[in-house]
Image: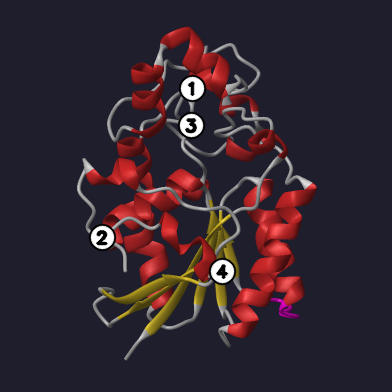
Amino acid sequence: MSHKLILIRHGKSVWNLKNIFTGWVDVELDVQGEQEASLAVDLIKNADIVPTYAFTSYLKRAQRTLEIILEGLEIKNLPQEKSWRLNERHYGALQGLNKEEVKIKYGDEQFLKWRRSYDTPPPQLDITSDMNPKNDPLYSNIQSLPLSECLADTYQRVIPYWEKTIRPIVLKNTTIISAHGNSLRALCKYLFEISDNDIVKLEIPTGNPLLISLNNSCKIHSASYLDSSRSEILPDFID
């Protein structure tokens, strides 16, 4: 038996288009991002897929992407769960900074390590910063909130949530996860068994649903982006 899982990175946010490190800062979708989510509706319709359960993060850019998709599919009252464990990775002191300016200041090598390496976190956010998630009532009941994360840190919160909460749902539903570039990279690393070295090659495009078929052991049977014109982004280890 095959189980359908759709992964979608939220559409472009206002900070994506300004080339700013966003992380846990709760910015809105840009108009272009809303359009990307609307295009995802057509892709899902054309694939004849009807989600029966949804997961998303605590951040409104992912939530709004999911909302647009469900509205477009005319699906009401879909069971869904929100979790901080699906949040974008925390970019620490880089949050709010322009990526090109960071690259110029610190050099290409350090910039790439912070942005794409598996186990090199950016400098920590100052604990007194307004961007400290402890200042947000949304996270008031959560212990050990990060002030910076590398992808390995993100993996350590995403995969236990997958195993305990998402996986049992996937085995009984057609599931959609609307999340972020790095939380989805962490999940793909696990599902596709991507090495620490190869994960640096994986870029998740915005607004392009990745349809994965899983067997009863949640091993991948097949996977493809629904917008085939953007499938060239996929590295060799994803068919």
Position above or below: 153 against 198: above
Residue type of the residue flagged with mark 2: Phe
Determine whether label 1 and label 3 are within 8 Å by CB.
yes
Position above or below: 143 against 51: above
Q: Residue at x 27, y 31 (%)?
A: 119
Is residue 24 or residue 42 the one in the foreground?
42
User: N-terminal of the two: label 4 or label 3?
Assistant: 4
Picture quadrant of residue 13: top right
User: N-terminal of the two: label 2 or label 4?
Assistant: 4
Residues at marks 2 and 3, CA–CA distance in whole angstroms:
27 Å
User: N-terminal of the two: label 1 or label 2?
Assistant: 1
Q: Residue at x 70, y 72 (%)?
A: 70
Helix, strand, or loop for circle 4? strand
Which label sits in the foreground, 2 or 4? 2
The residue beneath circle 1 is 92
- Region of the chain picked out in magenta, as a range: 73-77
The residue beneath circle 2 is 237
Residue type of the residue flagged with mark 4: Ala
Residue 185: image location, x then y, percent: 39, 50
> Does the magenta portion include 1?
no
The residue beneath circle 4 is 54
Residues at marks 4 and 3, CA–CA distance in whole angstroms:
23 Å
Residue 49: image location, x then y, percent: 56, 84
Helix, strand, or loop for circle 1? helix
The residue beneath circle 3 is 90
Side of 130 where 239 appears, left or right:
left
